Structure formats: structure tokens, C-alpha cells
Image: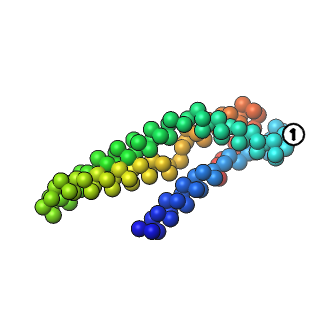
Amino acid sequence: MKKTGLVVILLILSSCASRPKLYPNHKFKSAGKEAAKKDIDKCLSEAEKYLESSKGKKIAKGAGAGAAIGAAMGAVGGLFSGNVGKGLLRGGSIGAAGGGAAGAISPDEIKRRYVNQCLAEKGYQVLGWD
């Protein structure tokens, strides 16, 4: 169980560090690395503010789906152990936690698209994300 927790923490930290990599076009060369970094930071900040509620909804949706699947699995397990109610409760709790975590660590493609568009409007070309 400890290894799983460590993997989740590492995935969360690595997803926070994801940043766009820019093509060295005319805009990038004329602005310089520091100005480009500030523009990236500004676009990332704008994306967070604009899409703030989207991430919360995704986590809640993942938790709800996970709870439903976990509860169904718990009920089946409860049939075999003789305690369906306890199986529902355990399965639902475990499923909600897993579904919520999966929603929280999945890549936010909408945020990336927002930042890509923001940078394009400033004249940059995004090669990809690291």
C-alpha cells in the first residue's frame, strides 16, 4: 500500500511540473527565454483561473463512477461472504477513493489546449509538453 501512495504522489507532482516546450521561431528568439517563460507562466495561470471548476467536476465525476463500480464489486463480494451491506459500503468507499484519484491525476487536455491557444495568440508555437 505504501508503494501505491508513493506512485500517486509522484504522478501528481509530475503532472504539476508539465510545461509547454516552445519552437524557437521569430517570436521566441526576439522575446528571449525569460520573457517566453513569463508568457508561459501567465498563460498557465490564466488557464487555472478559467478552468478552475472543470478540474473539481472531473474529480467528483471520477469519484462517483468509482463509487458505483466499487459498490457493485463489494456487493458481489458480500454475497460470497454473507454480508452484502458491508460489502457495498467497503466497495463503494474504495471505488470512490480510486475514482477520485484517477480523475485528479489524469492529464487535463483542456488546460493544455487553453495554454497552447494563449501562447499562439502571443506569437509562439508550442512543440509539445514535458
For mark 1, does the 10 Å Cα neighbourhood hold few (<14), some (14 to 19), or many (20 or more) residues? few
Question: In the rendered image of this protein, does residue 48 appear above or below residue 67?
Answer: above
- Residue at the left extreme, as displayed: 82
**Closest to the observer: 77 or 113?**
77
Q: Residue at x 50, y 36 (%)?
A: 54
- Which x, y percent locates residue 2? 45, 68
Reading the image, the residue beneath label 1 is 30
Question: What is the residue that sits farthest to the right in this orientation?
Answer: 30
Please report the residue visible at 60 percent of the width from the left and 35 percent of the height from the top. 49
Q: Is residue 76 visible?
A: no
Residue at image point 58% right, 52% down: 15
Q: Amino acid at mark 1?
A: Ser
Give the percent coordinates (x, y) of residue 90: 27, 56
Q: Is residue 41 visible?
A: yes
* The quarter of the displayed image where residue 115 is located: top right
Q: Quadrant of the N terminus?
A: bottom left
Task: Report the residue at 45% width, 47% height from top.
Answer: 103
Front-most of residues 69 and 2: 2
**Residue 57 location (% of width, % of height):** 45, 38
Q: Tag 1's secondary structure?
A: helix
Q: Position of residue 40 (x, y in %)?
A: 72, 41
